[in-house]
Each structure stands twice: as C-alpha cells, then as structure tokens.
C-alpha cells in the first residue's frame, strides 16, 4: 500500500518499486514499529488529536496485528513497500480510514529511526548475554588449567613459560571490553528520535518526551534534523560486532593451532567438530574456522555502512535504507557464532602433559638467567648478552640451560653462580611472575576471580536491561 500519491499522475514503474522495496528485510522491525505506534497513539490522544473512543479501536487493532504477525497470519504482501506501509495496510484493513490516523505528527523518517534503535537495543542486549556465557565458559576452563604449564609465545615462537589458564582467561578479559563497549553504546543509543517527524518536529503538539519515556528511552534527541539523520548508533554497533568478531577470530585461530597434530594440545569434543567426506580420519575444528571467517563479513558490514554515510547530507535520504541489512546480518552472525563457540570452549579437553613437556623447550627459561644477573646489579644489556651466550653454549653442546656446567655459567658471566639452576625450572619461572596480571598460578587465580565478580555484575545488569525491555515491549 502506497503512503503517498496525490501529486503523481502515474503509478510508479515496476523497476523502481523493486529497487525501493525494503519489506523483504525490514519486516522483522514489525514488533518495534507496532510498539512505537502505540506510544505515538497515546501522544495523539494526549494532544487531543484522536478521540479516546477511536484510540481504543486503534490500540485494539495494533494488538491484533501483533498477535497475527506472531502467528504468521498477517504477512507482508507483494504490494507493500516497507514494514511501515504494510502495517498501515493492516490497520486500514481493520479500521478503514481510521487506520491512517497514526500518520499524523510523524513520518517514516522518525519512525524508522525509532524502530531501528529499538531493534538494535534489543539485540545488542542479547549479544551481551551471549558474550557473558562465553566468558564464563572460558573462565571455568581457565580455572581447570590455572597451574598447567605451557609454552607462551611471541612471534609464534617459544618466549616464556606461562600457565595455560592464563592463556584461556586472556580471551575473557578481551571480551570484557566488548561488554563495556555495549554498556557505553547503550547509554548513547537510548535516545528517542520519535517526534522529529520528517525533519523539523511537529506542529501538532505531540510531546516527544512522553513518547520517549514510554519506549524506555532516557531522553529525546535534542535536534530533530540530527534525530532523523543519525546512524552513529548503527556504525558503533557494527564496530562492536566487528570487534567481537575479531576477538572470536583470534581465539578461533588459537583453537585451530592447538588442535593441530603438530601442537596436540586441544581435543575438540566430537559434538563440536566435523569430519571429512573423503578422509575418514579427519576431525576438523569448523566452529573455530567459521568464527575466523565470519570476522570478515562483520568488518565488511561496518565498512559498508560507514561508506554509505560518508558525504550523505543530513536529514533523511533514501541511502539510509541501506543501514538495515548490514546491522541485521552482524547481529544474526554473532547470535549464530557465539553459542557454538561457547559450546566448543566448554567441552574442549587440553593435554596437560604435552603442554608441560613443551613449556621449557626453545630455551624459554633464558630470561631467568638475565633476571638473575639483574638481581645482582648487572646492567641489563650485559645480563641479556650473558643469557644469550648460555643459549649459544646449549645449542653447541645440545643440552638444556640447567645442564650447563658451573664453568660454562662463569664463562658467560662471572656473577653467574651455580644457584642460578634453582631458577631454571618451569615451576620457578612461573611462580616468580606473581605481579598483578602475571602468569604465576596465584596471580592467574586472582585475575580469574576478580573478572568473575565483574561478569556476575554484568550478568545481572544484562538481565535487568532485558527484563525492562520486554516489559516496555509488552505494554
Ligand atoms: N524503508 C525506509 C527506510 O528503511 C523507510 C523510510 C522511508 N522514508 C522516506 N521518506 N522515503 O529507510
């Protein structure tokens, strides 16, 4: 159903209509559009523009449409341009001309901006919930391996031993920043564009503040032109999704490496791995790979909306219709990837023996020698040089650092005494790194427990927000 036509002498061309239609993808905004319509209806009644007897009929029709959409009884038709026109058709089918009453004092421009904000708020809260589930799975595993030695890498080369729980927990810490971003985004996004009309506000006296309150927004966007133009909230949401995607991708890459035959550290559970159609022995970490791959589309969605917005004049331009599919796709992608990834993390078993055996290899304890010398006040450049000499001697005589003779240590540096050997064990190296954030088991456990407290708080923040949103939607 067309929402315009008076000044046109011909129907629109089929090609234009096909290009213009957004109903295939914006139909999912229907529940939010209906809720915003109810808020607008209340505003029209308060402004005495709709009689309360008519308002009752309109409110009833809105409720019916909601239920019919839920049941799949009311569906978009091929003639509907977008979700807004489809729902107005639904209302007029029920109420005749009274069905168009809601168009007074608002425009699809403030309507679509409102609907999309509500949609984004709802789904970002869901994403936050899924992230917290993943953080918890990571921390449960991190605790299990909080004293399991493993090689730590820089440049993907053995660097220093770490406990494996430290490696697992680091991902939960990275995800914590994503939750912080969502909270911050939510505060900024919780501003209502409803009442901005086409761009200049409305002459009809409908109060935007009351509508904003009814929809759970904290405030009204201060400038009505900005209100219909602003898609920063879409870009920011897409950035957060891309950042989460990048975190999942980096995690996925580690899972792929760890589960390779060469590493042999991780055994992905059968329920979270796939096989090969030709090689019967294969067990592939597809979840990790798909997470890594999907980061590409999440980044693409962000850049597509940024590029669409660049240079766009303010107020509504039809280009803005291109904001929806990328946003929907990024949110859908995360809602698909996160639960699978969480399942994989929760069920993966790690081989402590293999990791422990590998921890001291590659002369990963060489830093202990340099640190020993620093403790007896040798300047670090000399200490580093001496430790390097020790590695060279080991390579020549094919021994490990602790197997060097007293003479060899002394040759590397006169201050290097036999008691350095006490430091040349993985346990000693790990235990000595007990600073905040360090890899000593005690330090890792305290990192895990302070993050757990934050996660618990975030979980209750998320459930409060989600309950408030559902309550608002069902009013
Ligand atoms: N389908 C449009 C969109 O998604 C709704 C707004 C249309 N407004 C307009 N003035 N043509 O952006």
Image (cartoon, helix red, strand yellow):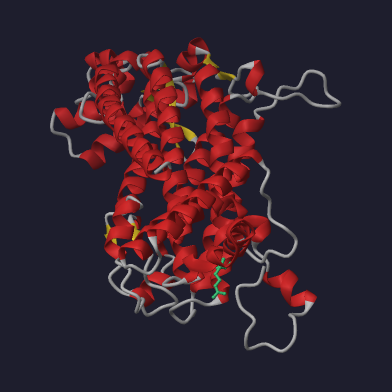
**Rendered image quadrant of residue 373:** top left
**Rendered image quadrant of residue 404:** top left
Against 437, residue 26 (above or below) is: below
Q: Quadrant for the C terminus, please.
A: top left
Question: Does the rendering let one see residue 434?
Answer: yes
Residue nearest the observer in this picture, 448 or 351: 448
Residue nearest the observer in this picture, 90 or 347: 90
Quadrant of ligand 1: it is bottom right
| Residue 95 on image: x %, y % | 58, 59
Residue at the location (28% across, 21% down)? 440
| Residue 415 on image: x %, y % | 19, 25
Residue at the location (66% across, 66% down)? 81
Against 201, residue 287 (above or below) is: above
Residue projecting furthest to the right: 278
| Residue 392 on image: x %, y % | 43, 30
Question: Does the rendering let one see residue 393?
Answer: no
| Residue 138 on image: x %, y % | 43, 25
Residue projecting furthest to the front: 53
Q: Quadrant for the N terminus, please.
A: bottom right
Residue at the location (68% across, 44% down)? 73
Residue at the location (52% across, 13% down)? 351
């Amino acid at each position: 159903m067309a929402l315009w036509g008076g000044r046109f002498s011909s129907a629109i061309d089929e090609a234009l209509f096909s290009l213009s239609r957004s109903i295939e993808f914006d139909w999912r905004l229907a529940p939010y559009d209906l809720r915003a319509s109810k808020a607008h209806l209340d505003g029209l009644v308060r402004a005495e523009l709709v009689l309360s007897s008519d308002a009752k009929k309109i409110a009833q029709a809105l409720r019916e449409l909601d239920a019919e959409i839920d049941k799949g009884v009311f569906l978009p038709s091929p003639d509907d341009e977008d979700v807004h026109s489809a729902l107005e058709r639904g209302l007029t089918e029920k109420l005749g001309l009274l069905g168009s009453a809601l168009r007074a004092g608002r425009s699809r421009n403030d309507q679509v901006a409102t609907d999309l904000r509500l949609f984004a708020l709802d789904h970002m809260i869901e994403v936050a919930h899924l992230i917290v589930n993943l953080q918890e799975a990571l921390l449960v595993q991190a605790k299990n391996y909080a004293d399991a030695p493993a090689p730590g890498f820089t440049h993907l080369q053995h660097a220093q031993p770490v406990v494996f729980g430290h490696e697992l927990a680091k991902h939960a810490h990275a995800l914590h920043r994503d939750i912080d971003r969502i909270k911050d985004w939510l505060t900024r996004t919780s501003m209502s564009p409803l009442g901005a009309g086409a761009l200049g506000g409305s002459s009809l006296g409908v109060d935007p503040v009351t509508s904003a309150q009814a929809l759970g927004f904290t405030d009204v966007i201060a400038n009505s032109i900005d209100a219909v133009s602003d898609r920063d909230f879409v870009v920011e949401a897409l950035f957060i999704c891309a950042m989460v995607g990048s975190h999942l991708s980096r995690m996925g890459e580690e899972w792929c490496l760890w589960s390779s035959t060469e590493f042999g550290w991780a055994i992905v559970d059968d329920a979270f791995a796939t096989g090969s159609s030709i090689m019967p022995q294969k067990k592939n970490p597809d979840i990790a790979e798909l997470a890594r791959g999907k980061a590409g589309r999440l980044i693409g969605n962000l850049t597509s909306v940024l590029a669409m917005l660049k240079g766009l004049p303010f107020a509504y331009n039809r280009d803005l219709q291109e904001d929806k599919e990328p946003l929907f796709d990024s949110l859908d992608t995360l809602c698909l990837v996160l639960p699978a990834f969480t399942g994989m993390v929760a069920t993966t078993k790690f081989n402590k023996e293999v990791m422990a055996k590998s921890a001291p290899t590659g002369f990963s304890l060489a830093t202990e020698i340099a640190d020993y010398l620093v403790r007896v006040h040798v300047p670090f450049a000399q200490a580093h040089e001496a430790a390097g000499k020790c590695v060279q001697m080991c390579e020549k005589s094919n021994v490990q650092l602790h197997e060097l003779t007293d003479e060899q240590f002394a040759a590397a540096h006169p201050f290097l005494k036999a008691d350095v050997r006490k430091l040349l064990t993985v346990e000693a190296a790990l235990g000595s790194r007990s600073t905040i954030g360090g890899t000593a088991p005690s330090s890792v456990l305290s990192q895990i427990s302070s993050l757990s407290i934050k996660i618990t708080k975030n979980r209750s923040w998320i459930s409060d927000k989600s309950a408030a949103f559902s309550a608002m939607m069902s009013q």
